[in-house]
């Protein structure tokens, strides 16, 4: 019987789940419960016996997982009929403590709870998902897979900030990086497509979705990444500003009487492409740009310019680059963004082939003469979580 892992990603008001074939990465079923705790929730389940959709209120994450189990029973596959070897949980922040996935026990829950100040919007929800799943599925091993773990190979000069030295020990202030599960999967898949081992390649991976991050990966190890203490730093994103002068907080407090909490909220939820155009959907941004919208044009140019800056910086960090890899929603689907972000880099040996760029869904999009390969690689974070969870269970 094929081994499966039930992958759970619990958000503050959502529960996303997927039953993943650990060998192929195929999902036997997927589902999402949104607006948990609100008057009108939304549950969708895609299974082999059909699709299910319901807007009945779901009061809690426990009720959401109970609804998911019922959907499995009705629309398949019934969990009792599948060889489930583990439950893999996405946890956003593992701090400095977790450089690898880990089995869930009381000690892990206590450690992740201590990390809540570093990820107050994410870790509490992740913990709730773990606790609920352990209650409802007590006979299965549970494994936590951390978004930050892949970047724990950063050297101190890359992860430390030039702030008072004791701030790291006292407050945990350092670069952690995120999207590690995606960067790990994509870098390995890119190596397969190039017919080489991941430990033989220097890569720049660009995860471009609503959240965006770049990573410099030397021989399979992350040596720098654009997100920092939080996912706010780095590239321009759908609703996040990315890099900006840290004095903005103080300036707004002085001239606008704006609190640090309000500035933080705006920089995370009302900035980025949304702040510039009122729209964080990159497809709509592209449509408006094509129609001559000046704000959309500016946002697109700023977005791609920031990517280009990080490509140049990480080229210098790595010394030599074998490939640049685009992934996630925008990275996989926007040929325009890929072309613009790597335009005029012939001097660095980077040349995008316009025909391949528009036609390729996975594989090389650079010219035959490009010294640095450029690839598109669809990410599959659920499969990566499943594989890492299975590796922990197997020991």
Image: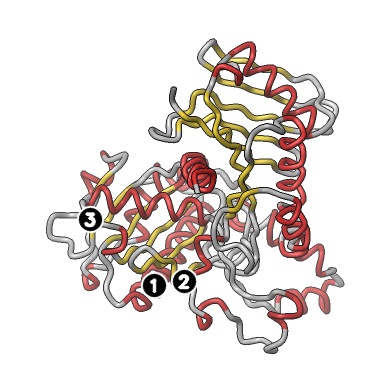
Q: CA distance from mark 2 to mark 3?
A: 22 Å
Viewed as shown, does residue 119 lie left or right of 217? right
Instruction: Single out the mark in the foreground, 1 or 2.
Output: 2
Q: Are marks 1 and 2 in contact (CB under 8 Å)?
A: yes
Seen in the picture, residue 34 relative to 364 is either above or below; the reply is: above
Viewed as shown, does residue 62 lie left or right of 211? right
User: Image quadrant of residue 38?
Assistant: top right
Disc nearer the start of the sequence (3/1): 3
Find residue 196 and name its label: 3
Find residue 314 and name its label: 1
Q: Position of residue 290 (x, y in %)?
A: 42, 44
Taking the spot 56% from the left edge, 49% from the top edge, the residue there is: 210
Q: Quadrant of the N terminus?
A: top left
Taking the spot 72% from the left edge, 57% from the top edge, the residue there is: 112
Instruction: Single out the mark in the foreground, 3 or 1.
Output: 3
Find residue 224 and name its label: 2
Viewed as shown, does residue 143 lie left or right of 315? right
Seen in the picture, residue 20 relative to 128 is either above or below; the reply is: above
SS for dot 1: helix
Towards the viewer: 73 or 45: 73
Disc nearer the start of the sequence (1/2): 2
SS for dot 3: loop
SS for dot 2: strand
Q: CA distance from mark 3 to mark 1?
A: 21 Å
Q: CA distance from mark 1 to mark 2?
A: 8 Å
């Amino acid at each position: 019987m094929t081994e499966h892992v039930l992958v759970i990603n619990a958000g503050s008001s959502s529960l996303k789940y997927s039953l993943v074939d650990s060998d192929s990465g195929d999902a036997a079923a997927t589902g999402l419960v949104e607006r948990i705790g609100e008057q009108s929730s939304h549950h969708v389940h895609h299974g082999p016996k059909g699709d299910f959709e319901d807007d009945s209120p779901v009061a809690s994450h426990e009720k959401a997982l109970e609804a998911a189990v019922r959907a499995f029973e009705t629309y398949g596959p019934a969990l009792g009929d599948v060889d489930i070897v583990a439950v893999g949980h996405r946890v956003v922040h593992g701090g400095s403590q977790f450089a690898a996935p880990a089995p869930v026990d009381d000690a892990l829950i206590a450690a992740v709870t201590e990390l809540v100040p570093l990820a107050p919007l994410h870790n509490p929800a992740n913990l709730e998902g773990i606790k609920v799943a352990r209650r409802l599925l007590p006979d299965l091993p549970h494994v936590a897979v951390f978004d930050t773990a892949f970047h724990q190979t950063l050297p101190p000069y890359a992860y430390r900030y030039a702030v008072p030295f004791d701030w790291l020990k006292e407050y945990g202030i350092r670069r952690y990086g995120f999207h590690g599960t995606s960067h790990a999967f994509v870098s390995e898949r890119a190596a397969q497509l190039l017919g080489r081992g991941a430990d033989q390649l220097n890569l720049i991976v660009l995860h471009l979705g609503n959240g965006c991050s770049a990573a410099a990966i030397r021989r399979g190890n992350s040596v720098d990444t654009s997100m920092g203490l939080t996912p706010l730093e780095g590239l321009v994103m759908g609703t996040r500003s990315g890099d900006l002068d840290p004095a903005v907080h103080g300036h707004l407090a002085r001239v606008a009487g704006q609190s640090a909490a309000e500035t933080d909220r705006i920089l995370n939820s009302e900035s980025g492409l949304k702040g510039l155009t009122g729209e964080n959907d990159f497809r709509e941004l592209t449509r408006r740009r094509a129609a001559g919208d000046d704000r959309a044009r500016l946002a697109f140019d700023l977005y791609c310019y920031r990517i280009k800056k990080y490509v140049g910086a990480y080229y210098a960090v790595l010394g030599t680059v074998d490939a640049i890899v685009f992934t996630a929603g925008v990275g996989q689907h926007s040929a325009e963004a890929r072309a613009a972000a790597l335009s005029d880099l012939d001097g660095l040996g980077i040349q995008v082939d316009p025909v391949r760029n528009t036609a390729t869904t996975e594989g090389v999009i650079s010219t035959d003469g490009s010294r640095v390969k450029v690839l598109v690689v669809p990410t599959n974070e659920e499969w990566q979580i499943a594989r890492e969870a299975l590796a922990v269970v197997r020991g």
